[in-house]
């Protein structure tokens, strides 16, 4: 514990508080709250009941009101901490409520009814998890089907992305041909065109080739990514040409050079692109929503949208399922972020 | 067999011409060394022979067959690269096997060839390591091993020793010479180090700016350089070159005069020279001797004397700004600013005409 305190209050030079210490502490702490706050709130709220979600002011942790079975009443009664007129406090159960006056009973002596103004009482709450937010969708909502669709889209799109992008990057980095730099420029230039601009033409194209309302219609338009081609090309430029020449002397065909020499050596960059691709495809919402219309083809992100109806939004389910869909992405970052940083660094300078 | 013939080879990149009309015949089993300063086109020439690059014009033949348009793989040659170019993601064994697997050689034969090469190059102990775990010298052996297992018609070596430290370079050089003797396969070796060229070559090709300056056996190049460039390039320290004027020339003897009362009668075919022509006199530092003055000697000012033990390297100037380097057998040369008397034996002199070409000895 003292180690943690020493760590958190570590200062420049070790003596006194320089203003930069204060600023950097506030900066880092503020960043922590801004970045982690919503995630923590999301996870906390995903365990709340619909009633709890509506409570104001909102809480980070999920609470449930404590209840007790009281003799003479059929249902369990909600417990309140009550401030009595004589100034003492006592835990009482609410029998019924009329306007701003509640009729309370002592669970130990159920026959005496005390009338209390509701301003003078606080519900007794304890931390409790509404796990049915998680279990219910698995039963009523087609979670597993959506999960399967999402996994299929993510895996196939990532594999095809890696293959096509690395082949393009190989050609653009290792062969000299007329118009190579222009081609590269065009590919990178498409980065400036957002999806919303090409959404309608893309929809017509996908419709014309008959891929509407199929998972391949979600996968194929997304596999050629300018970012991926650029990332891999920059990395492949660092692979010495002499290696390729050596392979040519070793009777390797151009395909073998790509498959057995360049691809294994570009593994760090491929890992980065794979991570990116998984995250992108997993989180895709707009494009699948446009292409898919049959419910059994929905991916998780589109499926989640069905909880937001026209008249009411089932926040408790949305929050819980959002947490579930976040898990793979979080795991990817936790375990592979080492590759992301080293891979991105490696593609630029080396 | 491993005869390689190059006829009228040109190579240009756009308007830039790298190689000009190269003609070269490499005999079977020969160790031919291409030497020249960086940028002279020697590596380009090697890549043309390898098939990694195509000539703009000309013909390449291997054992009489025209291979000008044949791919690198089909030429049956093996190359050792300057950076070794070992596949970093494969073990040493996989590196050696890669080329053989590509021609679908049976597994048993691949293993036998690797074992043989590993024994010969003493790399058996680290066959299962990756190139990243090897030292520079070990990588070098593996790179040579990768060429050896292919059993090629000829080896092409592109500055294979330039990434090694000085000591290792000398021992590896000796090993390469021994390997060439044992395999008796044609080797074409590119280097910019004239010592490597002198010690390894059966024949040396001196190149400059995309042209062949001279082809010959090492000692022939040393003793009779065809022009000023070869004279300056072969031999260390460099040959001294002094500007002289022809005073008289005949079929058998050329009399020249130069700076610092230099006057010499050189036995050379002077029939193309006229009295009054400018010429260049060359003499190697090792051929200069200490003299006690008198006829045939020049007076020089010592600027620096490096005592190496067995010999002393004297840097001197004659008549102002003509620099002269002499390697003298004696010790105890006075340094800095002292006058010294040096004898330049006429028999050891080389004479070059105003175009820089050697005036043939008689």
Image (cartoon, helix red, strand yellow):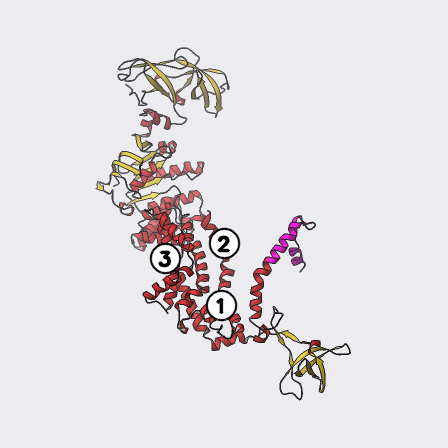
Residue A6 shown in magenta: yes
**Mark 3 Cα-neighbour bin, 10 Å: few <14, some 14–19, many ≥20:** some
Considering depth in this image, is A269 or A90 the residue closer to the camera? A90
Q: Is residue A59 above or below residue A74?
A: above
For the question of whether residue A84 can be seen, the reply is yes
- Tell whether position B187 is magenta: no
Find the magenta span and give its range: A1-30
Mark toward the start of the polypeptide (1 vs 3): 3
The disc placed on residue B109 is: none
Q: Which residue is mark 2?
A: A341
Query: Which of the two residues, B123 or A231, is positioned nearer the viewer here?
Result: A231
Marked residue chain, label 2: A
Report, in whole angstroms, how far the alpha carbon at label 2 lies from the one at label 1: 24 Å
Residue occupied by mark 3: A164
Spatial CA distance of label 1 from label 3 is 27 Å
Which of the 4 image quarters holds residue B285?
A: top left
Decide: few, some or many residues near mark 1? Use Cα within 10 Å; few <14, some 14-19, many ≥20.
Answer: some
Q: Residue at x 30, y 35 (%)?
A: B19
Report, in whole angstroms, how far the alpha carbon at label 2 lies from the one at label 3: 23 Å
Q: Position of residue B184 (x, y in %)?
A: 30, 39
Q: Secondary structure at mark 2?
A: helix
Q: Quadrant of residue A124?
A: bottom right
User: In which chain is the residue bearing label 3?
Assistant: A
Find numbered disc 1 in the image and state the secondary structure of the residue it sits on: helix
Residue sitting at the far front:
A99
Picture coordinates of residue B324 (x, y %)? 42, 20
Which quadrant, please, contains the C terminus of chain B?
Answer: top left
| Residue sitting nearer the eye, A58 or B19 | A58
- Going by the picture, which residue comes out furthest to the right? A86
The residue labelled by disc 1 is A325
Q: Chain of mark 1?
A: A
């Amino acid at each position: 514990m003292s180690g943690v305190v020493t760590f958190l209050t570590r200062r420049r030079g070790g003596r006194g508080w320089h203003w930069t210490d204060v600023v950097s502490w506030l900066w880092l702490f503020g960043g922590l709250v801004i970045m982690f706050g919503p995630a923590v709130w999301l996870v906390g709220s995903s365990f709340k009941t619909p009633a709890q979600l509506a409570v104001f002011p909102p809480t980070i942790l999920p609470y449930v009101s404590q209840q007790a079975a009281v003799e003479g009443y059929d249902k369990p009664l909600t417990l309140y901490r009550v401030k009595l007129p004589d100034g003492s406090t006592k835990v009482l159960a609410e029998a019924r409520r009329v306007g701003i006056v509640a009729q309370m009973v002592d669970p130990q002596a159920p026959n005496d009814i005390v009338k209390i103004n509701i301003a003078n009482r606080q519900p007794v709450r304890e931390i409790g998890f509404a796990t049915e937010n998680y279990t219910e969708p698995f039963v009523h909502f087609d979670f597993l089907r959506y999960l399967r669709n999402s996994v299929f889209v993510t895996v196939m799109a990532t594999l095809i992305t890696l293959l096509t992008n690395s082949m393009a990057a190989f050609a653009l980095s290792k062969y000299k041909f007329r118009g190579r730099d222009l081609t590269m420029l065009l590919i990178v230039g498409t980065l400036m065109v957002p999806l919303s601009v090409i959404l309608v033409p893309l929809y017509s194209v996908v419709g014309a080739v008959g891929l509407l309302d199929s998972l391949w219609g979600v996968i194929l338009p997304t596999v050629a990514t300018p970012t991926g081609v650029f990332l891999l090309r920059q990395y492949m430029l660092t692979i010495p040409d002499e290696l390729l020449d050596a392979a040519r002397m070793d009777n390797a065909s151009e395909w073998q050079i790509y498959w057995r020499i360049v691809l294994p050596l570009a593994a760090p960059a491929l890992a980065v692109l794979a991570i990116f691709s998984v995250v992108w495809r997993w989180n895709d919402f707009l494009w699948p929503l446009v292409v898919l219309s049959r419910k059994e083809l929905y991916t998780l992100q589109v499926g989640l949208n069905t909880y937001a109806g026209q008249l009411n939004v089932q926040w408790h389910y949305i929050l819980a399922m959002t947490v579930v869909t976040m898990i793979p992405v979080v795991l990817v970052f936790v375990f592979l972020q080492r590759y992301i940083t080293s891979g991105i660094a490696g593609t630029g300078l080396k | 067999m491993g005869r390689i013939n190059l006829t009228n080879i040109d190579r240009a990149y756009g308007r830039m011409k790298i190689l000009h009309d190269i003609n070269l015949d490499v005999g079977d089993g020969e160790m031919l060394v291409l030497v020249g300063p960086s940028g002279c086109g020697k590596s380009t020439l090697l890549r043309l022979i390898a098939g990694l690059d195509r000539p703009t014009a000309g013909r390449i033949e291997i054992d009489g067959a025209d291979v000008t348009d044949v791919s690198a793989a089909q030429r049956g040659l093996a190359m050792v690269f300057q950076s070794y170019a070992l596949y970093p993601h494969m073990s040493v064994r996989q590196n050696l096997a890669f080329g053989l697997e590509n021609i679908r050689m049976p597994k048993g034969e691949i293993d036998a060839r690797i074992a043989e090469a590993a024994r010969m190059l003493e790399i058996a102990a680290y066959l299962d390591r990756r190139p990243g775990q090897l030292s520079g010298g070990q990588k070098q052996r593996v790179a040579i091993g990768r060429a050896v297992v292919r059993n090629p018609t000829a080896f092409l070596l592109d500055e294979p020793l330039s990434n090694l430290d000085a000591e290792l370079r000398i021992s590896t050089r000796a090993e390469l010479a021994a390997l060439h003797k044992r395999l008796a396969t044609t080797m074409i070796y590119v280097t910019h180090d004239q010592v490597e060229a002198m010690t390894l070559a059966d024949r040396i090709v001196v190149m400059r700016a995309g042209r062949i300056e001279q082809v010959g056996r090492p000692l022939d190049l040393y003793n009779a350089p065809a022009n000023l460039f070869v004279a300056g390039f072969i031999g260390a320290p460099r040959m001294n070159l002094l500007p002289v004027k022809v005073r008289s020339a005949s079929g058998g003897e050329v009399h020249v005069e130069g700076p610092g009362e230099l006057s010499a009668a050189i036995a050379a075919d002077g029939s193309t020279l006229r009295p009054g022509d400018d010429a260049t006199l060359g003499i190697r530092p090792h051929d200069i001797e200490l003299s006690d003055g008198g006829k045939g000697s020049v007076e020089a000012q010592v600027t620096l004397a490096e005592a190496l033990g067995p010999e002393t390297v004297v840097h001197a100037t004659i008549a102002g700004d003509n620099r002269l380097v002499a390697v003298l057998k004696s010790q105890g040369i006075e340094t800095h600013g002292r006058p010294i008397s040096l004898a330049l034996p006429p028999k050891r002199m080389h004479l070059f005409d105003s175009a820089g070409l050697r005036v043939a000895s008689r």
